[in-house]
Amino acid sequence: MIFYKTFIIITISLFFGAQGAQSKGGYIKRGLKHCTGVCDQESICTLDQDKKYRWCLKKCSHKIDVKKMCKSITPPKMRPFLPYEDSSATLSTNEVSPLALLGLDMKFIKQTTDRKRLVGTAKKLLLVHEQYVRGKNIQKLSSKRREKRAKKLFREFFKNSPETLKIFDKTKQIPDEKMVVLFNTIKRELTTKYNKKR
């Protein structure tokens, strides 16, 4: 009987000791940062607090349902694919979100009279794809280097269509049907990756 009681006490102690060690292990893995007091605050839901939001999502979702808390403030489909940037540079990636992708179709192309802007949108998409799908961090690049990378990605996309590149070199425009192919291809790949991560 004494052996049995001792066994139960040891088992219970080990169980609670392991749970305590596990929670301490999580605290250490989070860089000695607490979830409570940060990730339970609605202030992390705004886009300007995106860095905190993503940290909470990654490190504290086991404790706090961050997605659910923030859903009504900034729905996931409105969040950019890439971490929110403070930069307002021409090729800032903030505008590329799952919701924004829905509007990139032939109707959008036909309505965009500024063809330079249309090419700029295509370049942004390609840059986001480069980081989000291919894992190459474009957000650390300066504006100049980002522009250079975007041009390269744009030309690479149309490398099997020399006629399209010839038109672009002459007019700085892309035929509508070729632009819709670019939009659809990149949209599909971004959406596929996004749906896998959810």
Image: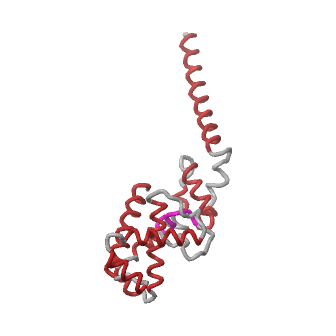
Which quarter of the figure has residue 101? bottom left
Residue located 63% across and 59% down the image: 41
Q: In the orientation shown, which residue stands out farthest toward the bottom?
A: 113
Q: Is residue 108 visible?
A: no
Which quarter of the figure has residue 146? bottom right
Image: magenta residue range: 76-84
Does 139 sit left or right of 105 as displayed? Answer: right
Residue located 33% across and 75% down the image: 162
Predominant secondary structure in magenta? loop
Q: Nearer the viewer, residue 146 or 86?
A: 146
Q: State the image coordinates of residue 13 (x, y, percent, origin top left).
A: 60, 24
Q: Quadrant of the C terminus?
A: bottom left
Q: How are the residues colored?
A: secondary structure
Q: Is residue 67 visible?
A: yes
Q: Nearer the viewer, residue 125 or 165?
A: 165
Q: State the image coordinates of residue 2 (x, y, percent, origin top left).
A: 58, 10
Residue located 40% across and 55% down the image: 196
Does 165 sit left or right of 84 as displayed? Answer: left
Q: Quadrant of the N terminus?
A: top right
Tell whether position 81 is magenta. yes
Q: State the image coordinates of residue 12 (x, y, percent, origin top left).
A: 57, 25
Q: State the image coordinates of residue 175 (x, y, percent, origin top left).
A: 34, 82
Give the total of numbered labels: 0
Tell whether position 160 is magenta. no
